[in-house]
Image: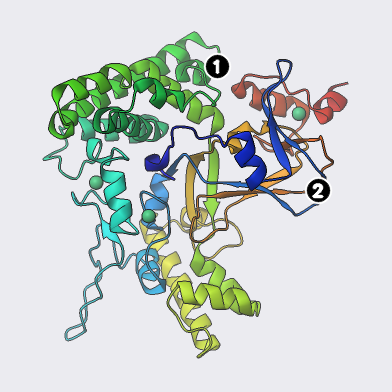
Amino acid sequence: MSSSSLAPSTLPSDALLTAQFPSISILVSPFTNRGIYATKHIRKGDVVFTDSPAFFRQELANRRDCIVCASCAKFIGQLSFMGDVLCRRRTREGALQRELKPGAPPPPPPPGVPCQAACGEWYCSETCRDAHWKQGGHCLLCVGACKDESHALAQFKMHAVGTCHDELLAAEAMATMVARVAFDGTPFGAVLGVLAPFATAPYHAIVGAGDPAATADALSRNQEGFALLRQGLAERLAAFAPNADAAEMALKTVASYEVFSGLLGIFELNNLAVDCESPVDRLMFALENQLADDATVLSERLGVDAEADRKALVKHLVLMANEAQAARIQDAEGDAVTAAEAVAPGRRFPGLEGTALFALGSCMNHSCSPNVESRYDDIESPATVTVFATRDIAAGEEICHAYIEEEADVRVRRSSLRHYGFTCMCPRCVAESA
Ligand SMILES: [Zn+2]
Ligand SMILES: [Zn+2]
Ligand SMILES: [Zn+2]
């Protein structure tokens, strides 16, 4: 997961795919797009496949509410820590914001492992931290050691935050690839080959959507961002690469604008939104709805005793939800409406939100009457997607999800899909446009 786990081949081989997910296969035909097809009857509600992301990035606005491992996306800590973060008693940097009462015991040290350069990233373990630092290329991007905001990497980050958040994801992907060439001596062809399965187009052409001024504008913005990134990468490589030749090879082959723009295009066309409910919310739901098994698993994970006094625990969670809501209103400068938007409807605590690129998931084509949906409900791996059937699927049928809102009428749907470079000819669109 995250940048560190982008393996040389991100798509499972046919044999592996069959062993893992026996009811699907990937079909490539010269007459259609690559797609995923059912090889046997799949019943409504069945899991069709699961996929862990090749890349994952948490939404910037979500970083205050949820602290997850920057390498494997696991939720860090137990109920007390999560509560402290949700209620803004503790910041991402680990500091306690609220003053302690005189004589109160010092708070326990935060769980998890911070980035060694204290950039604000957290890890579930030293293993994740070390893997992300070197193989994941974090040492090439980390801004913790930057002396001030004039450093190229700090400038790049501000540029990306201000103009195009996907530049951050593209930078992580690029840093991972640069690290593999510079640190491990992996041939650059193998490194770039990882990207081959994904559909792409130059990013500025996608977002420009045929408008020359918008296209030129996007191009110059991304080139500006890339120039800063490349300068930062070159500086870091000088410090971390085993020798100057390795650094130069990585810069010349992988750190080009074409690769950067191609990565942005891949993310633009293939990303899925990750949305995993907070474990705290799930515990509360399980307790309120007498789901004993769920409550046991969740309370164990969150380090609380649900058996001892269920009522007291529910009360504690209700108070926490109120305090977290008040903290968000304060964040939103008193605007309760904006604060409420930070939490999905039907939830009391914000969950994990981000965008991810899935190798297998990106093989799914679009339909306006899809037969599957995605969910993110694996607490130990919240960015892993589970794709399940929303109706019975016959053997031979294509597995399709909706890239866009399905409710809109055919004109709106087709215009939204132009972004992906095709005119939808799904049965529903054909029928509705006749
Ligand atoms: Zn981890
Ligand atoms: Zn760092
Ligand atoms: Zn359609």
Which residue, given by chain and number where applicable, does mark 1 sit on?
Answer: 209
The answer to whether the beta carbon of the residue marked 1 is less than 8 Å from any atom of ligand 3 is no
Q: Going 74% across and 44% down the picture, which residue do you hit?
A: 23
Q: Secondary structure at mark 1?
A: loop
For the N terminus, the quadrant is: top left
Q: Which mark is residue 382?
A: none
Image position, residue 407 (x, y; %): 74, 39
In the visual, does 352 lie left or right of 250? right
Q: Pick whichever of labels 1 and 2 is earlier in the sequence.
A: 1
Q: Going 74% across and 16% down the picture, which residue do you hit?
A: 31
Q: Nearer the viewer, mark 1 or mark 2?
A: 2
Which residue, given by chain and number where applicable, does mark 2 sit on?
Answer: 391
Image position, residue 246 (x, y; %): 21, 24
- Establish if 295 lies above or below 44: below
The single residue placed furthest to the top in the displayed view is 212
Viewer-side residue, 323 vs 270: 270
Viewer-side residue, 65 vs 122: 122
Image position, residue 33 (x, y; %): 68, 22
Q: Are marks 1 and 2 in contact (CB under 8 Å)?
A: no
Tell me the crowding category of disc 1: few under 14, some 14 to 19, or many 20 or more residues within 10 angstroms, Cα based: some
Q: Going 25% across and 66% down the picture, which residue do you hit?
A: 97
